[in-house]
Amino acid sequence: MGGKTKQKLLEELFSQFIDFFPYPIAIFTPEHTLSMVNKAFEEETNMQFTNMEKGDVRILQYKINDMQLAAAVMKVFAGDTFFLEGLKNPFSMFSGITHQGIQQSDRFSKAVVFPVPVDDTAITHGVIVFMA
């Protein structure tokens, strides 16, 4: 199996793992735009991201009510990882998600926010995994 084929297979496997993970996952860029969400995120927010253009959904910093979550979203690109508890209505920070669209806003009161480095040189994405 060639290097390109093996790499493509690993990327597809990784993508499937994220998509079928039972907790909502949001992957975002340093510009705070979503580059990927999984099915659990779509179900929780009642939004379909498959038809949206990349960058259509943003993390709205002025709508983050929880200071620990706001700090994590900002500092993740410095290489920091955060485990947060006691979150209130965390999905409200995403553009296009209304309070009516969220099934149970307090259901996910915990989150892990971590960086995704490329070749140990630059952090290209941040990840938020929401947990009950």
Image: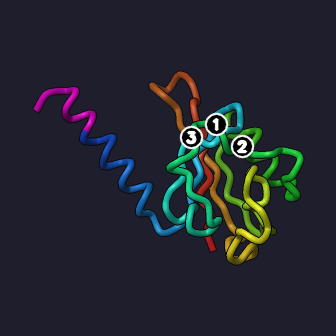
Image point (71%, 68%), residue name:
101
Image point (81%, 68%), residue name:
88
The image shows a total of numbered marks equal to: 3
Task: Name the secondary structure under disc 2.
Answer: loop
Magenta region's main secondary structure? helix
Nearer-N-terminus badge (2/3)? 3
The magenta span reads: 1-8
Looking at the image, residue 106 sits to the left or right of residue 29; the answer is right
Quarter that holds the N terminus: top left
In the rendered image, which residue does mark 3 sit on? 35
Q: Position of residue 65 (x, y in %)?
A: 88, 58
Type of amino acid at the residue the image marks with label 3: Ser
3 is higher (above) or lower (below) than 100 = above
User: Rounded to the nearest whole Å, what is the CA distance between mark 1 and mark 2?
Assistant: 7 Å
Residue 123's image quarter? Answer: top right
How packed mark 1 is, by other alpha carbons closer than 10 Å (few <14, some 14-19, many 20 or more), is some
Task: Name the secondary structure under disc 3.
Answer: strand
Check contact, mark 2 vs mark 3: CB within 8 A. Answer: no
In the rendered image, which residue does mark 1 sit on? 55
* 68 within the magenta span: no
What number is the disc on residue 58?
2
How packed mark 2 is, by other alpha carbons closer than 10 Å (few <14, some 14-19, many 20 or more), is some
